[in-house]
Amino acid sequence: MKKKLLSAMLITAMTASLLAGCGGAKDETSADPGTAAQEQQQDAAAPEEEAPAQVEAAGAADEGKVLNIYCWNDEFKRRIQDHYPGYTADASDATKGTIGDVTVVWNITPNDDNAYQNNLDETLLKQADAAVDDKIDIFLVEADYALKYVDTEFTMPVADLGITDADLANQYQYTKDIVTDSNGVLKGVSWQGCPGAMFYSREAAKEVFGTDDPAEVQKYVADWDTFTETAATLKDAGYSIISSVNDSYRVYSNNVTSKWVEDGKINIDDNIMKWVEDSKALVDAGETSTYELWSDDWSKGFYPEGKVFSYFGPAWFINFSMAADAEGSIGNAGGWAATEGPQGFFWGGTWICAATGTDNASLIKDIMLQMTCNEEIMKEIVVADDDFVNNKPAMEGMAADPGYSSKILGGQNPLGMYCAGVEGLDLSNLSIYDQGCNEEFQNAMKNYFDGNTDLDGALDLFYKAVVEKYPDLTY
């Protein structure tokens, strides 16, 4: 199949994300459903053409001289620059570097308004006809939309790069499940594991509870009912228990017992509705807000004057998102601590995928092996970046190491907590509809929490938004 047929396959696999218009939620992508249907009909009638040449397994004689990497921020770039052997940054151009005689080109498009996925989709659809030096070699995906890409021929099986099950034996299983296609083929790897914890202000805990010890603080947030009771105590002391209802959403949504879509019908799990009930109570009592994640108002709690007791997140969150480098922030002063919170959960993660059509298979193989399987590099990332890495021996060893601690967490070693959490992750209810349904549900419920509509009205907004995005669904 050439570009046209591959385009139809991509559209079919990406239906959940590509049918939305440009003006929607953050992680939507845009395509004309009419055009998609026409292309599929035309391709069905056309004789099947030969597929573009598959990349040879690692070790091919003619490796390319340009490695194009597509991502949405500089996190992976910093990991490569700091930890990959032989990478040299270009002092005059931040978008470039070198590995040996290969020029590395970083194509970074922020996630805002779904720009990253839009750009990636458009470029992948041109991949078969692109000039060699313009082809995508590596692209990154997140858990929320990984299936959209791994269920297409645009992602190479890692086995085709020469990576074996034995190479990946020390990785956490859930990180493999997320990027395994519907035929059971592994299509990506990650250096991260992202089990979550509840990060709370030590000073606030000492002021309100008389202790900042994680085991003692856990008693005040052991389940959602206790969490809600504690919110009232914190409010009396001048604190919001969380910055926004959106902080706790992923904890609830990671603990569902059913999928967003069952037999083509939109389904709202009981635990999602519990989030609505609990969040409405918190907002009405003035114990939290409805701020959007990543907004300036939401971020005020990273500083003492913001008066926010806690945030939920994985290891990358405290290092990458909580202003730890900013003077005067709680993190910069080592003022956070971690405890389990009401329920275990995970959030995010970044997966490295090789694009079909790459001419850098050997180099991609080495990057994947070094950055996700090399135990020493894994340990370096933990120490340097406060990340939780995708290597069981490395994490279990460092969890038991009295010499390791997190400066941001005031000298605490949270790795044992993460190790316990990662083993219990259940991804059986993931689906290609998750990203859109989660976003639209939170958008609709904000209207309810803010008093702009009743619950039935908010649910109606949600159903209509999802059906507009995914016309194949009913409710």
Image: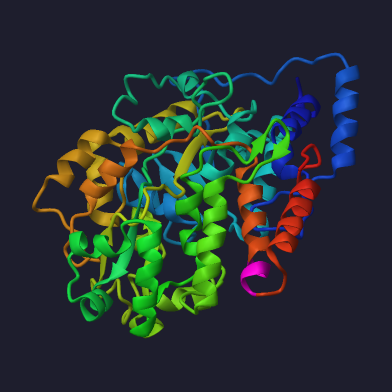
Question: Does residue 227 appear in this view?
Answer: yes
- 279 lies above or below 163: below
Q: Residue at x 19, y 70 (%)?
A: 212
* Quadrant showing the N terminus: top right
Q: Is residue 393 left or right of residue 39?
A: left
As drawn, is 253 to the left or to the right of 450? left
Give the camera-side residue of 475 and 409. Answer: 475
Q: Nearer the viewer, residue 146 or 312?
A: 312
Residue 52, position in %: x, y? Answer: 69, 21
Q: Residue at x 33, y 82 (%)?
A: 304
* Residue 276, horizontal then vertical, whole percent: 57, 60
Q: Which residues are magenta?
A: 446-450
Q: Position of residue 158 (x, y in %)?
A: 47, 24
What residue is drawn where x is 47% and y is 38%? 352
**Is residue 102 covered in magenta?**
no
Q: Quadrant of the C terminus?
A: top right
Picture residue at 31% right of the left edge, 82% below the top: 328
- Residue 72 seen in render: no
Viewer-nearest residue: 231 or 376: 231
In this image, 370 relative to 77: left or right?
left
Q: Main secondary structure of the magenta part?
A: helix
Query: Where is residue 165, by image quadrant?
Result: top left
